[in-house]
Amino acid sequence: MQLWRIPMIYIGASVVCGFTLPRIEQAYLTSYTFNLSVASAQASLSAAASGMMALTGVIFAMAFVMVQFSAIAYSPRLVLWFGRDHVLFHSLGVFTATFLYALFTLAWIDRGASGTVPLFSTLLVMILVILSMLLFARMVQRLKNLQITSVLQLIGDKGREVIRDTFRRLDERPAAEWKPGIKAADTLYFGPTTQTVTYSGNPRTITELNMEALVQQGKQSDAVIEMVAAVGDTLIEGSVILRIHGGKARLPEGDLMRAIHVDVARTFEQDPKYPIRLLVDVAIKALSPAINDPTTAVQAIDQIEDLLRRLSEHDLDSGFARDSDGVLRLIVPMPTWEDYMTLAFDEIRQFGTSSVQVMRRLRAALIGLTDVTMIDARAESVQRYLKHLDLVIERSPFDLEDKTMALQEDRQGLGLSRRRSERS
């Protein structure tokens, strides 16, 4: 559901209740009245209505200012993430509903000079005010989450979640879902390209693939579907999305496109690269001359190293899916270990060459990955990257003393030196 509909549902519900509940009370529940004077009830409801509207303006002005500040300080891609917070839209809905329903109830106070205060309508306003205060407290807690440590932790948590969901153990997944590896014999079943699907429309980003639907379509046509575009790619006019190999008949392009979800921006679903991208954005912005905050970059590397350690435990070449009969039906491009390494460290290394603190933390991260990576090819890739980092330090403008410092590993950046030889 589009998020703007959440406050509209609250507003619609408050309007419906405002028109019906007071009339029901007047027609059938006249014996139930609130033991409060008319003047006091009118003053209370007026204060609730006016105060709630003022509170709504103040809170959301603060929220948008903080989100905008965080986008400038951290990454503009975080604006969409924070802006999609459901608590924000539920709060807007409840605040507005409280304001509107208080006005409706106020119109029924002393209705027809009866001198009565409707019980249930007044109680409902009180409940909405209490609920608004609870959401206000939740909003304040959400604003605290915009602190840099909380932001990095939230991005890291989303990264750990998407890695867990994307690379779940194969024995926990249905037969029609991901299965790793591709046999040489499988290529014999590709056959010639019989169909190519291209994109038409405004630029959009692939956010998620319905694997089960694509596998099922490939099985029905006895074809192999090869995704040319990957999750996270931006599609523009004329971009090739997929190719069909073999098959008894052409697959309906509408059905294929419905299995490929697109949006105006990247999301975390099925995209383990995206949280790393956000963490790198935060790190390199912190290393810019305008901010000059290498400690934030070190904190970002903490989260990046943790995500890479978790990725090192999984089969990253699992972009192949078979049907229930074990026949290859879907090929999806997936990033390699080198792709993740390049994304995680290249830009931080380039922008952090003038920071001894960042160089030391990068060395600690790379040596830590060497220790936990069990696949020889990946360990060799980390070692090559470590040698490249040492070469960058040797050619940096540091003096001899700073170079000696930079060539030491330190998980705190500047806190506790560890020489690799001593560690060994």
Image (cartoon, helix red, strand yellow):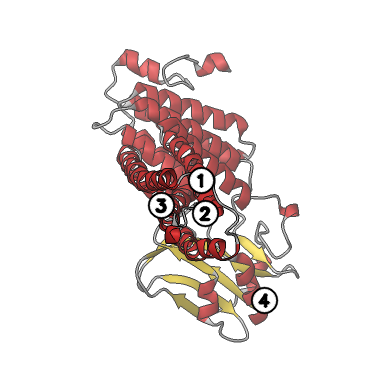
Residue 222 position, x and y percent, is 66, 79
Q: Amino acid at mark 1?
A: Met
Distance, label 3 to label 1, CA atoms, is 11 Å
Q: Is residue 186 above or below residue 358?
A: below
What kind of element bears circle 1?
Answer: helix
- Categorize mark 3 by other alpha carbons within 10 Å: few (<14), some (14-19), many (20+): many
Q: Residues within 10 Å of mark 1 (few under 14, many from 20)?
A: some
Q: Where in the figure is residue 105, as x and y percent of width and height?
A: 45, 55
- Give the CA distance from mark 4 to mark 2: 64 Å
Distance between mark 4 and mark 1 Cα atoms: 58 Å
Tell me the CA gap for discs 3 and 4: 55 Å
Q: Which residue has dot 4 on it? A: 219
* Residue type for callout 2: Pro
Q: Nearer the viewer, residue 295 or 365?
A: 295
Lower sequence index among marks 4 and 2: 2
Residue situated in front as seen by the camera: 402 or 216:
216
Asked whether the beta carbons under mark 3 and mark 1 sit within 8 Å of each other, the answer is no
Name the residue furthest left: 290
Residue sitting at x 57%, y 31%:
370
Asked if residue 243 shows in the view, the reply is no
- The tag earlier along the polypeptide, 3 or 4, is 3
Secondary structure under the numbered disc 2 in the rendered image: loop
Residue that badge 1 annotates: 126
Q: Residues within 10 Å of mark 2 (few under 14, many from 20)?
A: many
What numbered label is drawn on residue 99? 3
* Mark in the foreground, 4 or 2: 2
Type of residue at label 4?
Answer: Lys
Q: Which callout, 3 or 1, points at the residue further toward the start of the chain? A: 3
Give the mark nearest the N terminus, 2 or 1. Answer: 2
The residue shown at (41%, 58%) is: 107
Q: Which residue is mark 2?
A: 118
